[in-house]
Image (spheres, grey):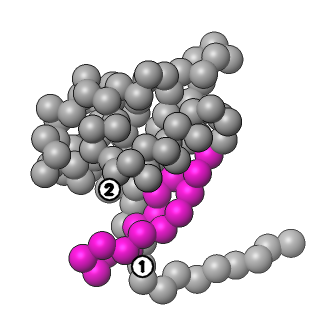
């Protein structure tokens, strides 16, 4: 993701192929995963930077082709994480993970 509109978005985008190999990272993703190697993670398996529990969930997402979303808080920073399969020509091609900082308290609206 060295070019285009996604490069400098203020949230992390990490893309894997169908084997779990990281194929793209935007600037925020590189920064988020700096302690694991940052840009050098491209070409490595996503399992290399996730716990066994997280790897189990990633395997489930791959097998069921369903999205997974959750919030986390680390070092006082709350984030929304959204992981979803992506497709190319109708065939499963890998996973995309979006990770963005969100406010500690966030409005929620029910619209009709």
The quadrant the C terminus occupies is bottom right
Residue 17 occupies quadrant: top left
Expressed as whole percent of the image width and height from the top left, the position of residue 45 reads: 31, 30
> Looking at this view, is 50 or 96 the one in front?
50
Is residue 87 positioned above or below 66 on the image? above
Instruction: Farthest residue to the front: give it.
Output: 52
Which region of the structure is painted magenta?
67-82
* Mark 1 surroundings within 10 Å by alpha-carbon count, few (fewer than 14), some (14 through 19), many (20 or more): few
Residue 111 occupies quadrant: bottom right
Which residue lies at the image location 53% right of the left edge and 63% below the top edge? Answer: 70
> Looking at this view, is 21 or 26 the one in front?
21
Q: Nearer the viewer, mark 2 or mark 1?
A: 1
> Looking at this view, is 55 or 70 the one in front?
55
Q: Would you name the residue on which mark 1 appears?
A: 103
Q: Secondary structure at mark 1?
A: loop
Expressed as whole percent of the image width and height from the top left, the position of residue 88 reads: 58, 18
Side of 50 where 40 appears, left or right: left
Side of 56 where 25 appears, left or right: left
- Disc assigned to residue 10: 2
Q: How many marks?
A: 2
Distance (Cα) linking label 2 and label 1: 14 Å
Cβ atoms under marks 2 and 1 closer than 8 Å: no
- Looking at the magenta stretch, what is its main secondary structure? strand
Which residue lies at the image location 52% right of the left edge and 47% below the top edge? Answer: 57
Expressed as whole percent of the image width and height from the top left, the position of residue 73 reads: 37, 74
* Mark 2 surroundings within 10 Å by alpha-carbon count, few (fewer than 14), some (14 through 19), many (20 or more): some
Sequence-earlier tag: 2 or 1: 2
Residue 7 occupies quadrant: top left
Is residue 71 positioned above or below 53 on the image? below
The quadrant the N terminus occupies is top left
78 falls in the magenta region: yes
């Amino acid at each position: 993701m060295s070019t285009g509109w996604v490069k400098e978005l203020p949230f992390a985008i990490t893309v894997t192929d169908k084997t779990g190999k990281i194929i793209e990272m935007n600037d925020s993703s590189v920064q988020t995963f700096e302690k694991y190697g940052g840009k050098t993670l491209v070409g490595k398996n996503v399992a290399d930077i996730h716990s066994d529990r997280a790897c189990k969930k990633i395997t489930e997402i791959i097998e069921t082709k369903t999205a997974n979303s959750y919030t986390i808080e680390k070092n006082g920073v709350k984030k929304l994480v959204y992981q979803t399969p992506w497709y190319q020509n109708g065939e499963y091609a890998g996973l995309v993970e979006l990770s963005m900082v969100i406010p500690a308290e966030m409005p929620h609206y029910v619209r009709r």
